[in-house]
Image (spheres, rainbow, N blue to C red):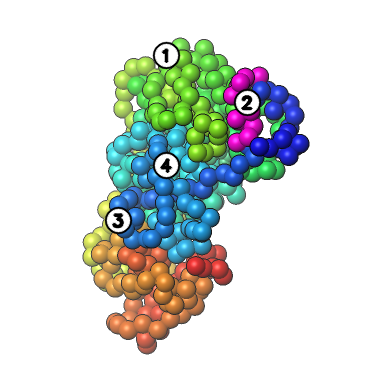
């Protein structure tokens, strides 16, 4: 049993509010704050099947009850240091944080916006459900966080996502009633993560709770503008503060009477209030504190963009076409877009990008250099081994994969040229073979010093 003294890193006013909210359940909640948090990841079904992955490893994993692809792992496993992480085979994500994207019920073909998306937990979960069909716009207001978001979209091999760095207001001006579904995982006071991130408690104040609630009102109003009639939106936070949870939802419904709360998902230990909002408490489930509400907009409509990108003609990129002919069994489908030397592939129906801060306009194919094409790391990660002519299939325990991820060359036999480097069947990057030596094309910024 933990005393209040032992938990003195939690602000007293926060604990008082929780006592008032939870009544006789408060001691159980308080004890849970002193317990260790759960670790989990979500298997990337864009790269592998759940049962296929479970057969491949001897890791002791326990299913997360509310997410078919989510699994708890123990301390003996360090998934972030394993080559599978670099190959985007899973995304390390807190178990409760898997709930909002499950509630969104993304389908292949949907036009979806993730408005507050970095570092990309929910975006990558939504993308997996979309199975590469439809359009996912991932937006993040802070430039440095938007970059991390873009890297995670790349690592997970997602082809149909656009990464933007805009304010919700600027997006709302651009994308009036365009989206079938919107995820609003709002910035909040983070009370549910105090156990995960001890420092978060130091920044807590009632004034900040109010500030967050005001900001959430503004973000939700922008999301409303962008949701098509008949569309579905999930609002979520990782705080217990009622002003930011049910409060934000109620104020929103008052301002927008054509919206209502709809059903989310259920699991043992989930608390549903009478309106249908979902609350997760760490003493009720194996996960941190979270809140989610599904909101639908009345009416009917279609998602999509009035103005779309047309792309450039293939014949204007001969270097790319020869790369495709020599190295890929099939030409990737979609329209080509050129930004300076950089070539991207966009799925059909991508919105016009003029006036937007774009970090990633679709799948980065590579760089058009003078008389040659250099494939991008993103292209490697978005490919399956059977799509390339030359593959270097390495095992996760091999010396070669260690050398590769550390940025070194390794010996290999075969014809010279580009090789898709794979680990246990998962693409992880490019190498270029010449004279029996595989030259390393693993991005410098991603190279590792500590691998298991
Ligand atoms: C809870 S986090 C998002 C986590 C993310 N959805 C995930 O699953 O990985 C909230 C995000 O909102 C961003 N944010 C902060 N202020 C914002 C604002 N005024 N409008 C929109 N987003 C904001 C933060 O930078 C942060 O990345």
Disc 2: CA contacts within 10 A as few (<14), some (14-19) or many (>=20): some
Residue range corresponding to the magenta coloring: 20-32
Q: Earlier in the sequence, mark 2 or mark 3?
A: 2
Do residues under tags 4 and 1 come within 8 Å of each other at their CB atoms?
no
Residue 386: quadrant of the picture: bottom left
Q: Earlier in the sequence, mark 3 or mark 1?
A: 3
Residue 122 in the magenta stretch? The answer is: no
Against 322, residue 95 (above or below) is above
Camera-nearest residue between 322 and 347: 347
Do residues under tags 3 and 4 come within 8 Å of each other at their CB atoms?
no
Q: Rounded to the nearest whole Å, what is the CA distance between mark 2 and mark 4? A: 25 Å
Instruction: Write down the residue under mark 1.
Output: 258
Please tell me the numbered disc located at residue 52. Answer: 3
User: Closer to us: mark 2 or mark 4?
Assistant: 2
**Percent position of residue 63, x then y:** 39, 44
Q: Residue at x 31, y 69 (%)?
A: 323
Q: Quadrant of ligand 1?
A: top right
Q: Rounded to the nearest whole Å, what is the CA distance between mark 3 and mark 4? A: 17 Å
Please tell me the numbered disc located at residue 395. Answer: none
User: Closer to us: mark 3 or mark 1?
Assistant: 3
Against 343, residue 423 (above or below) is below
Is label 3's Cβ within 8 Å of ligand 1?
no
Is label 4's Cβ within 8 Å of ligand 1?
no
Q: Rounded to the nearest whole Å, what is the CA distance between mark 3 and mark 1? A: 44 Å
Do residues under tags 3 and 1 come within 8 Å of each other at their CB atoms?
no
């Amino acid at each position: 049993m933990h005393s209040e003294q032992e938990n003195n890193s939690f602000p007293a006013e926060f604990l008082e509010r929780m006592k008032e909210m939870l009544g006789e359940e408060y001691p159980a909640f308080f004890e849970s704050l002193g317990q260790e948090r759960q670790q989990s990841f979500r298997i990337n079904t864009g790269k592998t099947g759940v049962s296929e992955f479970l057969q491949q490893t001897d890791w002791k994993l326990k299913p997360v009850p509310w997410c078919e692809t989510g699994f708890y792992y123990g301390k003996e496993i360090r998934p972030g240091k394993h080559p599978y992480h670099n190959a985007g085979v899973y995304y390390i994500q807190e178990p409760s944080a898997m709930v909002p994207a499950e509630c969104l019920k993304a389908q292949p073909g949907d036009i979806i916006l993730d408005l507050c998306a970095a570092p990309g937990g929910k975006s990558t979960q939504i993308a997996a459900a979309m199975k590469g069909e439809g359009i996912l716009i991932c937006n993040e207001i802070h430039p440095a966080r938007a970059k991390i978001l873009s890297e995670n979209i790349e690592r997970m091999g997602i082809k149909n996502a656009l990464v933007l760095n805009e304010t919700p207001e600027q997006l709302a001006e651009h994308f009036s009633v365009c989206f079938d579904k919107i995820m609003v995982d709002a910035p909040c006071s983070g009370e549910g993560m105090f156990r995960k991130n001890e420092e978060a408690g130091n920044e807590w104040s009632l004034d900040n709770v109010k500030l967050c609630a005001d900001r959430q009102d503004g973000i939700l109003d922008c999301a409303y503008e962008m949701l098509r009639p008949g569309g579905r939106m999930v609002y979520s936070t990782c705080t217990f503060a009622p002003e930011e949870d049910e409060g934000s939802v109620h104020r929103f419904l008052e301002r927008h009477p054509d919206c209502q709360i709809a059903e989310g998902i259920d699991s043992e230990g989930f608390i549903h209030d009478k309106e249908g909002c979902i609350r997760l408490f760490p003493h009720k489930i194996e996960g941190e504190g979270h809140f989610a509400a599904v909101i639908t907009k009345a009416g009917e409509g279609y998602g999509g963009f009035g103005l779309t990108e047309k792309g450039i003609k293939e014949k204007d990129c001969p270097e790319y076409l020869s790369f495709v002919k020599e190295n890929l069994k099939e030409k990737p489908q979609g329209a080509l877009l050129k930004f300076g030397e950089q070539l991207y592939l966009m799925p059909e129906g991508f919105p016009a990008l003029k006036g937007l801060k774009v970090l990633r306009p679709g799948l980065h194919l590579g760089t058009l250099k003078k008389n040659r094409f250099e494939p991008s790391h993103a292209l490697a990660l978005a490919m399956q081994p059977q799509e390339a002519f030359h593959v270097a299939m390495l095992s996760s325990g091999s010396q070669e994969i260690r050398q590769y991820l550390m940025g070194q060359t390794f010996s290999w036999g075969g014809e010279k040229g580009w090789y898709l480097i794979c680990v246990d069947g998962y693409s992880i990057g490019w190498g270029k073979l010449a004279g029996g030596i595989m030259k390393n094309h693993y991005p410098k910024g991603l190279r590792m010093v500590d691998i298991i």
